[in-house]
């Protein structure tokens, strides 16, 4: 996937695993074609060779612009996305209610 004007669109009818090379700051992820039941997807975020790209890993919306809350383990501790050039983070997200809410899990950070 790629970002356009700081927004990344995740189409769950296309795949469940995505790689985003951050070439600009990402302010929002828009999720489309969310299955009506439970679903899971994973995003690998790769900083480009410049790095220092902020990624709002907690900023998900529906195609209609509705915020999708993301619940993180540890009482809601928001992970800090690695901004070092050429490093990679992996995050997985699960929904049990057709995308009304997401549960986020850190698969690993600062790979590379």
Image: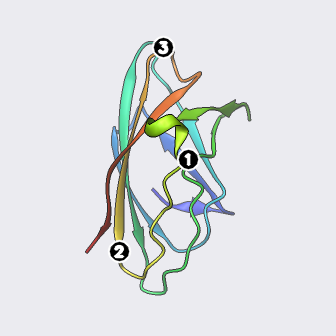
Which quadrant is home to the N terminus?
A: bottom left
- Is residue 36 positioned above or below 106 on the image? above
Q: Residue furthest bottom?
A: 50
- Is residue 22 positioned above or below 97 on the image? below
Q: Residue at x 59, y 68 (%)?
A: 54
Gap between marks 3 and 2 measured at Cα: 34 Å
Residue nearest the viewer, comparing 108 with 28: 108
The picture places residue 94, in percent across and down from the top left corner, at 41, 29
Gap between marks 1 and 3 measured at Cα: 18 Å
The picture places residue 20, in percent across and down from the top left corner, at 43, 60
| Label pair 2/1, CB-CB below 8 angstroms | no
Q: Residue at x 56, y 35 (%)?
A: 70
Mark drawn on residue 36 = 3
Residue nearest the viewer, comparing 71 with 22: 71
Residue at which label 2 appears: 87
Q: Residue at x 55, y 47 (%)?
A: 9
What secondary structure is marked by label 3? loop
- Which is closer to the viewer, label 3 or label 2? 2
Circle 3 crowding by C-alpha within 10 Å: few under 14, some 14–19, many from 20: few
Q: Hey, which quadrant is residue 17 in on the image?
A: top left
The answer to whether residue 72 shows anywhere in this view is no
Which quadrant is home to the C terminus?
A: bottom left
Residue at which label 1 appears: 9
């Amino acid at each position: 996937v790629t970002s356009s004007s700081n927004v990344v669109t995740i189409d769950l009818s296309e795949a469940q695993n995505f790689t985003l090379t951050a070439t600009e700051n990402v302010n929002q992820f828009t999720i489309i074609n969310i299955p009506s039941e439970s679903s899971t997807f994973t995003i690998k975020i790769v900083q480009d060779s410049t790095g220092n790209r902020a990624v709002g890993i907690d900023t998900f919306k529906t195609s209609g612009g509705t915020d999708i809350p993301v619940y993180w383990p540890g009482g809601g501790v928001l992970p800090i996305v690695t901004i070092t050039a050429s490093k990679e983070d992996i995050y997985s997200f699960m929904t049990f209610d057709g995308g009304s809410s997401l549960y986020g899990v850190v698969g690993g950070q600062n790979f590379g």
